[in-house]
Image (cartoon, rainbow, N blue to C red):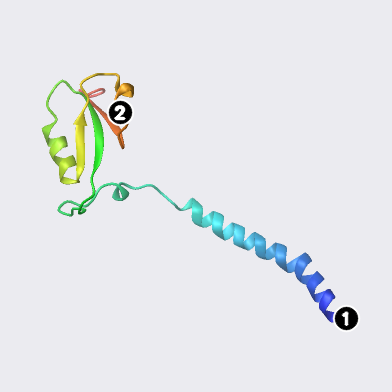
Amino acid sequence: SVFPSRLLFFGIFILPMLMIFITMYLWQNSITWEITASSYFLPTGEKIQNKSTNLLILNDTGSEINDLIAALKAQNIVPELALQKNITSIPQHHGAIKVSRAGKV
């Protein structure tokens, strides 16, 4: 009959090609993902309501970083300054950064 031969044709030739096209399409779209700052920071003046995150800051500059702290607070990020160099013993935070003047002239 005609139905098994069409099924065999579809299973051997069409289905593998269809699977390859779908796989290539999904793979190509997944490569174009990128991490941008817009996922984490808002444009100046915009604020997220009722959402904040904490950020541990290790100030290794030897001076005050009040401008950085004010900018973080404007983004609803709660900065917490680390007083010790070993920040691995401090309870978990959403993130941590080290501010230093290494390489500055």
Left or right: residue 43 versus residue 64 is right
Q: Quadrant of residue 94?
A: top left
Examine the rendered structure and indicate whether residue 67 appears above or below residue 16. above
Q: Residues within 10 Å of mark 1 (few under 14, many from 20)?
A: few
Image point 15% across, 36% down: which residue? 69
Which of 16/53 is in front? 53
Residue 74: percent from left, percent from top: 15, 45
**Residue depth check, mark 2 versus mark 1: number of the one nearer the observer:** 2
Q: Which mark is residue 48?
A: none
- The percent coordinates of residue 9 (x first, y second) are 79, 71
The N terminus - image quarter = bottom right
Amino acid at the residue labelled 1: Ser
Q: Quadrant of the C terminus?
A: top left
Along the polypeptide, which appears first: circle 2 or circle 1? 1
Q: Position of residue 49 (x, y in %)?
A: 20, 54
Q: Total label count? A: 2
Hey, what amino acid is under mark 2?
Answer: Pro
Closer-to-camera residue (84/6): 84
- Residue at horizontal 50 percent and vertical 57 percent from the top: 29
User: Residue farthest to the top?
Assistant: 85
Tell me if 35 is positioned left or right of 24 in this view: left
- Secondary element at tag 2: loop
Q: Are marks 2 and 1 in contact (CB under 8 Å)?
A: no
Residue beneath label 2, please? 91
* Residue underneath mark 1: 1
Position above or below: 83 against 11: above
